[in-house]
Amino acid sequence: MMNASLVWVCGAYQARRCYVQEGAIQALAESCSGLKSVDLCRCSEVTDAGVQALAEHYPGLNAVILMCCSEVTDAGLQVLAEHSPGLESAYLLRCSKVTDAGK
């Protein structure tokens, strides 16, 4: 089991797109203890299920970057809000399936 407080999944600011798939997010959720912050910027394959896995395994999340995660919806953010009471920031720029209701 990996112990980390911050996981930066992809060199997002250098990459045009991150090719991390849903299974990798599920594995991260199951194997990384103590996660507090996660950067999934430009991981367009991440869905609500991946966000849910992170939220359910890590209620102590305080920061999530989901910029350009085009498959994340309001439902994923609802689960994140329900399971992450200490969430202080969620960066959602260019999440095309997130509406004002989800923000």
Image (cartoon, rainbow, N blue to C red):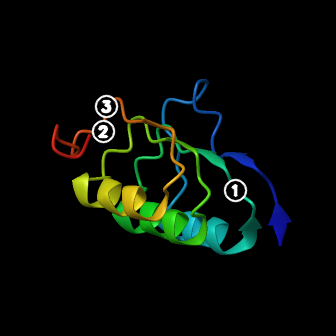
| Towards the viewer: 75 or 84 | 84
Residue toward you, 85 or 3:
85
In the rendered structure, are the residues bearing label 3 and label 2 in contact, judged by CB atoms less than 8 Å apart? yes
Q: For marks 3 and 2, give the CA distance.
A: 4 Å
Residue 54's place in the image compared with 103, above or below, is: below
Residue 33 placed where, x, y %? 76, 66
Amino acid of disc 3: Arg
| SS for dot 2 | loop
93 vs 31, left or right, is: left
**Amino acid type at image mark 2:** Cys
Q: Residue at x 64, y 45 (%)?
A: 37
Question: Disc count in the image?
Answer: 3
In the visual, does 36 lie left or right of 73?
A: right
The image quadrant that residue 45 belongs to is bottom left
Residue 13 is situated, as x and y percent measured from the top left of the image, at 58, 24
Q: Which residue is mark 1?
A: 35
Q: Which residue is mark 2?
A: 95
- Residue 47, percent from left and from top: 37, 60
Among all residues in the image, which is located at the extreme front?
Answer: 85
- Which is more toward the observer, 98 or 102? 102
Q: Quadrant of the N terminus?
A: bottom right
Tell me what residue is drawn at x 35 percent, y 62 percent. Answer: 48
Q: Position of residue 90 (x, y in %)?
A: 45, 39
- Identified by mark 1, the residue type is Leu
Q: Dot 1, crowdedness within 10 Å: few (<14), some or many (≥20)? A: many
Q: Element type at marker 1?
A: loop
The residue located at (61%, 46%) in the rendering is: 38
Which mark, residue 5? none
**Label ID, residue 94:** 3
Residue at 41%, 58% (x, y): give it.
Answer: 80
Figure check: 95 above or below 58? above
Q: Is residue 98 left or right of residue 86?
A: left
